Each structure stands twice: as structure tokens, then as C-alpha cells.
Image: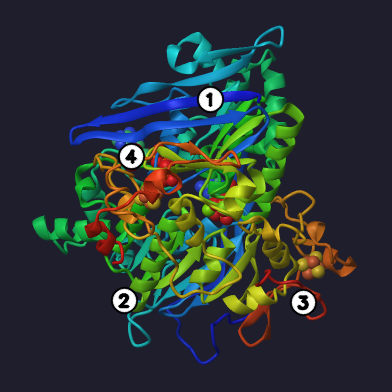
Amino acid sequence: MPAIHSNAENSSPLLEVNGLKKHFPLTAGLFSKVVSHIKAVDGVDFALKKGETLGLVGESGCGKTTVGRLIMRLYEPTAGSIQFRPHGEEGEDYNLATLDNASLRPVRSHLQMIFQDPYTSLNPRKTLLDIIGEPLRLNGMRKGSELEDRVVEMLRLVGLRPEYITRYPHAFSGGQRQRIGIARALILNPTLVIADEPVSALDVSVQAQILNLLKFLQRELDLTYLFIAHDLGVVKHISDRVAVMYVGKLVELAEADDLYRKPLHPYTEALLSAVHVAGPAQSHRERIVLEGEVADPSNPPSGCYFHPRCRYAQDRCRQETPELQGVAEGRYVACHLAEELDLAGAASG
Amino acid sequence: MDTLLEVRNLQTHFFMAEGVAKAVDSTTFSIRRGQVLGVVGESGCGKSVTARSIMRMVRPPGHTVDGEILYSRPDQDGQGASIDLLQLPATGTEMRAIRGGEIAMIFQEPRASLSPVHRIGDQITENILLHQEVSPSEAEEIAVDMLRQVHIPLAEQRLDAFAHQLSGGMCQRVMIAMALSCHPSLLIADEPTTALDVTTEAQILELMQGLQADLHMAIMFITHDLGVVADMADEVAVMYLGKVVEQGAAADIFRDPKHPYTIALLESLPRMDQRREWLQTIRGVVPDPYSTLSGCPFHPRCADFIEGVCDEIVPEPITLEDGREVRCLLYTEHAHQERPPVAEDASHS
Ligand SMILES: Nc1ncnc2c1ncn2[C@@H]1O[C@H](COP(=O)(O)OP(=O)(O)OP(=O)(O)O)[C@@H](O)[C@H]1O
Ligand SMILES: Nc1ncnc2c1ncn2[C@@H]1O[C@H](COP(=O)(O)OP(=O)(O)OP(=O)(O)O)[C@@H](O)[C@H]1O
Ligand code: SF4
Ligand code: SF4
Ligand SMILES: [Mg+2]
Ligand SMILES: [Mg+2]
């Protein structure tokens, strides 16, 4: 198993995920017989250094949210370990994958998630004061006006008006609700934030404001982000490193600049080629349209999961599964041809 | 000009304890048959409420208090007859036939708009049976076919799934499949690809473009992704605080935006070809829709603000040579009026 650290010297990262798996049963028929398993996450390894941002990108349904929910222990892992060291090297080392509920409690305040579906994650019968203030109250940290002041401060930071504090979630637009979720996740100054498509519903201007806020807080409070997003411009802007996922596995992991300049995996190349560029000027760049069916996570293709859609695939790719391997300083890729191919990066200039 | 939908002076307000929120305040725009109108604007500016008003799905305390929504409906002899949707009872048979059939909508928060307690297959087939003369088994075939077309793997098995068992992007694609299954003449797509990665998004956009060409479907495409707008839209409408402030051909608007708000919006885009530490934001925030501002609603944030003019005169839409409509006093004789000397000094700050 490769040790996927941001650099070799850093021996105890904040978070270290090894061999993480989540298989969901797929049922059929009246009696919900289990016919097979959806391998949503199927052997994922990575590490997060304190204070860094790791971007996580990949096709819809490839397992990104499931990775986040496993770290939050909202799902029980099928296999694997999740080492978490919120108090640094000297402090306690928790394996989130195996902790029971009681032992999870003290760790929970260090972990927050910004959920992908803001509306379904907000209680419709509670006001913003209750929703955003809840993490504080659960941790018994603040009461009364102090709590209210803190909620007002968070509202301001995410660009919502303090007067909204007594309103219910349904009275907000999609982007406003997304910001409510962000305010709630950040109010406790968590150590690790799993941000699942946190700015996907936001227009460019508010998006810029939120990205600036996330960066600012990171600098002030040394926050660490696992940043799940599909907008590659946003991911590049916010991430130190980027992990690319395909059907439950990581296929590439690298420093953001390196990955965008020179991807090593054909799937990354295809992703980068499909980016829209606003303005008519650059519309003639070649876009690699991925042909073929999206892989079925209950019955993935043989060999390299990407081979039916890969334009470089060879016989070997249909038989042998490539492992994620270190090929250069800080660069990991799972492709048999990684060292031979010369792939195109994102358009520049 | 073959206009399919013409929205005139639409006003939808929310009557709340704190006051009246003018979410849509005198919005005017039109959509031509078979064309794509991109609608952009900051979070909270009234895009979704406009869409819901067309669908007649605004719920109390919201009410559409004024305006016309002229829908030109092809009758039996292929002749167009124009009806004002606002004159139809919202829950009457005619509106029910139009909603989800002739005019279909992809909602902004897909997981929240899918039922949590019904299987997704049943939800899609129910809508098909409501609008098409087919048998239940044919409806199911159409449903499976549509799910395949939106690239959901294991389409047949997934009919039995509940929304919570699908990824965010899958819920969105289920919504899209449902909306497209009845071949609408107008598709209102409210942020339809926010949860999709670039390659899946490219496939979905291609599918929409295909149907647009084959069936002559018009699309009202609400999005904050200006790259997608550049790719998809024939025309663009830019909304600010419940009003359309600029509408024109997409190419013109990207090449040469006229309204100061449009200009600011284009400048706050994160780009893959540049690495900027902090992103540009439009200064200030969108004012509360409860507040009533004198003059131009954008004036507190506008870089071209003319004191004594912009804070006093309400700009009306005017048509420029290239057919573009702009609501800004810079393009009127007011901008060239002699200004009072006090204003002259202040404008340098
Ligand atoms: N049910 C409601 N009750 C009260 N106010 C509402 C309600 N729904 C929307 N609003 C207000 O109306 C305004 C416009 O909302 P709308 O959902 O149309 O915004 P939007 O342009 O779609 O924004 P976004 O890009 O964030 O989705 C917002 O300020 C919102 O707070
Ligand atoms: N609770 C669940 N029960 C059954 N299957 C599930 C469950 N949650 C997720 N899945 C399945 O696991 C796979 C991965 O889902 P996940 O939500 O992690 O994808 P994702 O990468 O976040 O996609 P998106 O970008 O569309 O949000 C999907 O096939 C999904 O249907
Ligand atoms: S291993 Fe083969 S099929 Fe897989 S990505 Fe590399 S070249 Fe393509
Ligand atoms: S009318 Fe004045 S304030 Fe309004 S957008 Fe034009 S220049 Fe700016
Ligand atoms: Mg997800
Ligand atoms: Mg909206």
C-alpha cells in the first residue's frame, strides 16, 4: 500500500485514510433480496496535513460524498482505517473507523461537514438561530446573547443579513441555504472541514466571497479542508493538492499546479479538457468526450476500471488492475502507461 | 419572431411579518421557440421565484401580484394561441396539463424536490402517465430509457431506489430525466448541472441540445456558471434584485457587456488560466428585497455611479442598436446632463 503523504518527512498527518471501503447492498424484488453490492468506495488511501486543502474531484456517483460521510462516521465503513490526530503528533490518535458512539463524541466537535444538499440537511422547523447555533449549544459552549452574537457574526461572514436570524430555511434561495450550511459548519472552529460541493449553488460573486472566507479562516485558524467539488476552476483556486477519483478508487493525486499543468492519468486529461471557458474566445479547444457507459459500481470492468472509455487502452489494461503508485515527488497515479503518455493539461493564457 | 413565452412586468412578492419582499419586481423578458435563454444573476436576485411563477407554483406567503405570462400554445391545427398563464387557476386542469408536460421544470435542489418515500421509478412513471397516453409498462420503458440517456448505470435496478440511495448528481439526473420524458416545448432548468462533474455535465448538455434541435424545445437555463451560458445560450438575461437589467444575444454580452452589473459579474469569475490569491468580488452585498432603494437599485454597489442621477432616477429598459435591452442611466441622456457641482466632487471618491 503506498503511503500517500503530502511529503515524506511528515510522519503523522492530521488525517490518514487507508484501504477505506464502503459497499452498499443492492436489493431487488419484494423481499429486498441482496443481489449484489455497489462498491461506492473501494480501497481509498490518502493523508491530509494540518492546514492544507485537498481537492477531491471525479464523476458524479464515483463515491466522493461517501468518502466524506465515512470520515464523519455517518456511514459505517466496510473496511479500512481512518486515523485522526486533532491534537497534533503528541496528542491522541483516533481511528474513526472503529470508534463507538461514546468515544466518538469528544472527536465530533473537531469534524464538520458542509453537506451537498443544503435543503435536506436543514431542519425546516427551526430558525437560523437554532440551526446555526446548534453545534455551539451541543458543545455547551455559549448561551443566550453570546450565542446570538456569534450566530450574527457567522451570518455576516457568509453574506447573509443578521435580520434573517429568526427566519426558517424555506424562506431562502438555493444559494442562501448553501451559505446557512457553511455558517453552521464553521461556527465551532473545527479542525477538519469536509466541504461537499460547498459553492456549487452560488453565483460567481458570492462564490468568490465564500472561497475568500474559507481561505481566510484557514489561514487564521489553521483549518484543514477536504474540498469536494466538480468545478475545476474552483478546485484549482482553493486546493494545495488534488485527488481524482474514478468508480470508488483514486486514480491520481498530485500538487494542484502539477496536476493541471500536466495530468498523468487519461481520466484527468479528459476532465480538464471538458471545462467550459466563459467567453467565446477559447471555444475551439479539443474536448475529449468520454464515450461508453459509465462504469457500473456493482460490477466494474476488468483490469483498469477506466479501460472501456480510455483512448489509450491496451490489452494489458483489460487484464491487470493498475495500483496507485508514486511516480515522482508527491505524484501518484494508477495507470499502466503513466510514464509513457504525454497528456494535455488545462488550457493556459 | 416566434415567441414562445413572454413575461411582462411580472411581480411576485412575499408577504412576511417583517414586510413585503419583492423577490420578482417588474421582470420582463421573452423566450423564442427552440431557443435557449440563459438567466444569470447573484444569489437571491429572484431567478427561482421567476421560474416558479411561470409554473404557477409560488406558495403563500408568496403571491404573483401583477404581470402577464403569455404562453403561445400550439393548438390542434398547429395555430398558435396565446394564453396568459396567470389567468388560469393554478390547480385547474389546464394548468396541470401544461405543468410537467408542455412546460417542465428541473428544480434547483433535486434531492429536496424528489419524494423521500416513493421509489424514483414510480415518480418518473407517474409523471409520464399524467401527460401521455401510454400503458404503465410503456411508461416504465420510457423511464428506463430516460435514465439510460442521463447516464445512470444500472438504470433498471435503480428504478427501485429511493432518493437517499443516490448521489447528489444522480438525483439531479433523475430530475432531468423526469422533466425531459414528456418532451416539453419549454424546459425551465434551474441550475440543472450544479451537482455534475464536467464530463457528465457535457453529456447532459449535449442531450438537452439534441432534444432542443429535434423537438424544437426552448430552454430557460438558469445558472451561475457563465461558462455553461457561453456554451448553451442564444440569448442571456441578467437579473439583479428582481429585475432583468440586461438582455441580449449571448455573444454580444460576453464580448461587450453594457450594464455595470454584468461587467462586475464577468470579472469575479475564478479562472483556470490564472492563479489569483483573492478573487474579485462585487463590493457590498445584494440589498434586502424588503428595502426600497431610490433610483437605480444597483447604485450603492455600482462602479459607474453618478451622484444626483443614479440615486434619483429609476432606469427604464432601453434598447441599444444591437437589439440589446439595458436598464442603466449611462445609456440615456441623463448621464450627460449637467450635474450639480457638489456631485461632481463626490464622484471622485
Ligand atoms: N418562501 C419564501 N419566503 C420568503 N422569501 C422568499 C421565499 N422564497 C424566496 N424568497 C426570497 O426571494 C428572493 C429571491 O429568491 P430566489 O430563490 O428567486 O433567488 P435566486 O435568484 O434563485 O437565488 P439562488 O441563485 O441563490 O438560487 C430571496 O431574497 C429570497 O430570500
Ligand atoms: N445510502 C446509500 N444506499 C445505497 N447506495 C448508496 C447510498 N449512498 C450512496 N450510494 C451509492 O454509492 C455511489 C456513490 O455515491 P456518492 O454519493 O458517494 O457519489 P458522489 O461521488 O458524491 O456523486 P455526486 O458527484 O453525484 O454527488 C452511488 O452509486 C450511490 O447510488
Ligand atoms: S491503465 Fe490503461 S486503460 Fe487505464 S487509464 Fe491507463 S492507459 Fe487507460
Ligand atoms: S443607472 Fe447608474 S447606478 Fe445604475 S447601473 Fe447604471 S450607472 Fe450604475
Ligand atoms: Mg456527492
Ligand atoms: Mg435559485
Q: Which residue is mark 4?
A: B314
Q: Secondary structure at mark 3?
A: loop
What residue type is disc 4 on? Answer: Val
Does the residue tagged 3 have its C-beta within 8 Å of any atom of ligand 3?
yes
Label 1 CA crowd tier, 10 Å (few <14, some 14–19, many 20+)? some
Residues indicated by labels 1 and 2 sit on the same polypeptide chain: no
**What distance separates the C-alpha of mark 3 from that of mark 2?**
38 Å
Q: Is residue A174 visible?
A: no
Chain letter behind tag 4: B
**What distance separates the C-alpha of mark 1 from that of mark 4?**
23 Å
Front disc: 3 or 2? 2
Residue found at the far right of this picture? A315
Rendered-image quadrant of the C terminus of chain A? bottom right
Q: Which residue is mark 2?
A: A221
Chain letter behind tag 2: A
Q: Secondary structure at mark 2?
A: helix
Chain letter behind tag 3: A
Q: Judge whether A60 appears above or below B212 on screen.
A: below
Chain letter behind tag 1: B
Q: Which residue is mark 1?
A: B6
Q: Secondary structure at mark 4?
A: loop
Q: Which label is found at residue A338? A: 3
Q: Is residue A51 left or right of residue B291?
A: right
Residue at image point 66% right, 17% down = B136
Front disc: 2 or 4? 4
